[in-house]
């Protein structure tokens, strides 16, 4: 890192950001001289692509003859560093922000509504961003161009499914799983658990199709100790991710959740109650290193139930499913690269009734065959710099997102899923490819979690996540329907206590 061109640029560190979790790695901040004379300044808050962005800017400078100042963040304190730069005498023309930061910049008048962009190509590009993915304060604006798409679901190694059910081709099983009802999924979980324990189980039905278990275990299926690789010590894995699933029944986007009425928050009780039932199923069938991981102190202990342990359990074949996102791919690669070609996403299902769903046009069937996809960061234009700097920043965004060279950069150099990917976009990362297929099929949910109180992190972890961890995961014994209702009611009350 450091100086990479005759014009010098600032870069710093490396970090991985996944929804509510920050997984740190990198070299920290490293200073280099900024150019004293430059045409415009890019503040890049997505440090995963810091080095690649430097190389891209080098090429763009060579192509255009411009001089660009680039700063890529190497710490987790994105908001404070950006705030300092935005208030300095040398402001970025192009900067990174997200749904959590948009209110600050819209209220201060420092972010351009791309509906009013002076560059017609950028204006058209912004209009193509699907409404649930738009960066907005109240739904009427369109403040940013997505860096990329991320998403999550139940990750499965299709070889494990093949050997559990003695399949020649896993594709029909995967398609039937996607279309299966929650009750069929619940039965699958119970029967897989029985097969792990005894080597025998009843055949399961998925989408009405029968799937008998293999007559005997293989070397691979003999490793299983549970159905799910769970991280009970990490509230973000269920408070943020799973909480977001339920919110999708009432809110179509983060903007909708942020502007929720008290009546809409009340409508969360049904979906959250159904989510509690699902989390009961997951936590009652969790894998451990040597056998099942039981609810109780071990379930929330970082030595037995951390994020890293959950990934290890899955990567070494001790669990059938890992509920995580495409960002986990490099972690799995370090542990067991052999399974990378056979990884894919399956949807997270809830036992919803149609009356639980308030989003217009969304059915239980579509909900349960979809995966959440969202934009972690956006490029935004700063209205507090000169008109020329704004114009140049707009031209760079158009180049990056519409030209063959720019789009190749996003996929090959950044390894990002474009928000407007088509079926020609292919990665070595099989999880990225799986997300694109859901995207193209229109089987996606959104990220209303980021519109919950305090931008998601508070409600997801300190309300919903804490209720689960401290009062339910931490104790042994069965959960009851009354427990499900209590979890839902207390979680809704926690939201209301902050907002109303």
Image: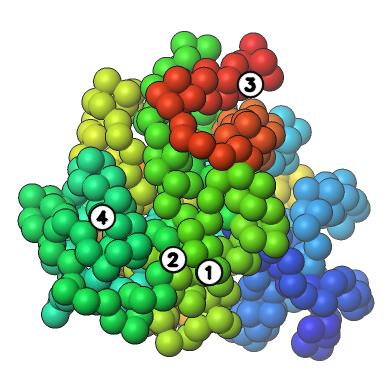
Residue bearing the label numbered 2: 225
Frontmost of labels 3 and 2 is 2
What label sits on residue 494 in the rendered view? 3
Q: Tell me if residue 462 comes above or below residue 311 in the rendering.
A: above
* Distance from the alpha carbon under mark 1 to that under mark 3: 37 Å
Q: Residues within 10 Å of mark 3 (few under 14, many from 20)?
A: some
308 lies left or right of 264:
right
- Foreground residue among 189 and 253: 189
Relative horizontal placement of residue 57, taking residue 267 as reference (left or right): right
Quote the CA–CA distance across marks 1 and 4. 20 Å
Point out the image quarter for the C terminus. Answer: top right
Outermost residue, front side = 198
200 sits to left or right of 153: left
User: What residue is shown at x 63% (from left), y 21% (from top)?
Assistant: 494
Residue of label 1: 290
Q: Earlier in the sequence, mark 1 or mark 4?
A: 4
Q: Could you say which disc has been placed on residue 191 in the image?
A: 4
At x 26% / y 55%, what residue is drawn? 191
Q: Which is more N-terminal, label 3 or label 1?
A: 1
Quadrant where the N terminus lies? bottom right
* Residue 109 seen by the camera: no
Q: Position of residue 100 (x, y in %)?
A: 66, 40
């Amino acid at each position: 890192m450091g100086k990479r061109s005759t014009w010098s640029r600032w870069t710093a560190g490396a970090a991985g950001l996944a929804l509510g979790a920050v997984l740190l790695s990198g070299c920290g901040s490293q200073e280099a001289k900024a150019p004293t004379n430059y045409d415009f300044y890019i503040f890049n808050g997505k440090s995963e692509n810091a080095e690649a962005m430097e190389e891209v800017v080098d090429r763009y400078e060579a192509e255009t003859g411009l001089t660009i100042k680039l700063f890529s963040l190497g710490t987790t304190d994105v908001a404070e560093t950006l705030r300092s730069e935005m208030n300095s005498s040398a402001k970025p023309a192009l900067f990174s922000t997200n749904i959590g930061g948009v209110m600050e910049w819209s209220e201060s008048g420092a972010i351009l509504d791309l509906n009013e962009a002076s560059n017609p190509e950028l204006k058209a590009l912004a209009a193509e961003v699907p409404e649930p993915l738009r960066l907005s304060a109240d739904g009427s604006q369109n403040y940013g161009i997505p860096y990329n798409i991320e998403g999550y679901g139940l990750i499965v190694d299709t070889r494990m499914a093949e050997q559990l059910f003695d399949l020649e081709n896993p594709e029909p099983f995967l398609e039937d799983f996607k279309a299966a009802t929650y009750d069929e999924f619940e039965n699958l979980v119970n029967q897989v658990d029985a097969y792990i324990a005894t080597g025998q189980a009843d055949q399961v039905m998925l989408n009405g199709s029968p799937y008998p278990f293999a007559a005997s275990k293989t070397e691979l299926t003999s490793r299983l100790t549970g159905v799910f690789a769970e991280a009970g010590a990490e509230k973000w894995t269920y408070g943020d991710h799973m909480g977001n699933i339920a919110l999708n029944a009432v809110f179509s986007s983060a903007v909708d959740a942020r502007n929720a009425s008290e009546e809409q928050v009340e409508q969360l009780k049904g979906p959250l109650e159904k989510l509690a039932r699902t989390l009961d199923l997951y936590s009652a069938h969790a894998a451990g290193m040597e056998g099942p991981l039981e609810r109780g102190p071990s379930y929330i202990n970082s030595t037995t139930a951390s994020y890293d342990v959950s990934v290890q359990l899955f990567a070494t074949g001790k669990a059938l499913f890992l509920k995580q996102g495409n960002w986990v791919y490099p972690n799995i690669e370090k542990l067991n690269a052999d399974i990378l070609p056979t990884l894919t996403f399956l949807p997270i299902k809830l036992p919803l009734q149609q009356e639980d769903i308030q989003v217009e046009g969304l059915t239980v069937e579509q909900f349960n065959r979809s995966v959440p996809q969202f934009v972690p960061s956006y490029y935004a234009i700063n209205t507090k710099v000169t008109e020329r700097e704004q114009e140049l920043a707009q031209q760079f965004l158009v180049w990056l997102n519409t030209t063959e060279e720019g789009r190749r950069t996003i996929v090959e150099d950044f390894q990002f899923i474009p928000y407007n990917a088509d079926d020609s976009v292919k990665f070595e990362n099989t999880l990225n490819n799986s997300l694109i297929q859901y995207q193209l099929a229109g089987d996606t949910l959104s990220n209303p979690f980021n519109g919950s109180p305090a931008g998601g992190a508070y409600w997801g972890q300190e309300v919903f996540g804490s209720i689960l961890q401290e009062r339910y995961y931490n104790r042994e014994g069965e959960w009851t329907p009354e427990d499900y209702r209590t979890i839902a009611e207390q979680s809704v009350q926690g939201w209301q206590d902050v907002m109303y």
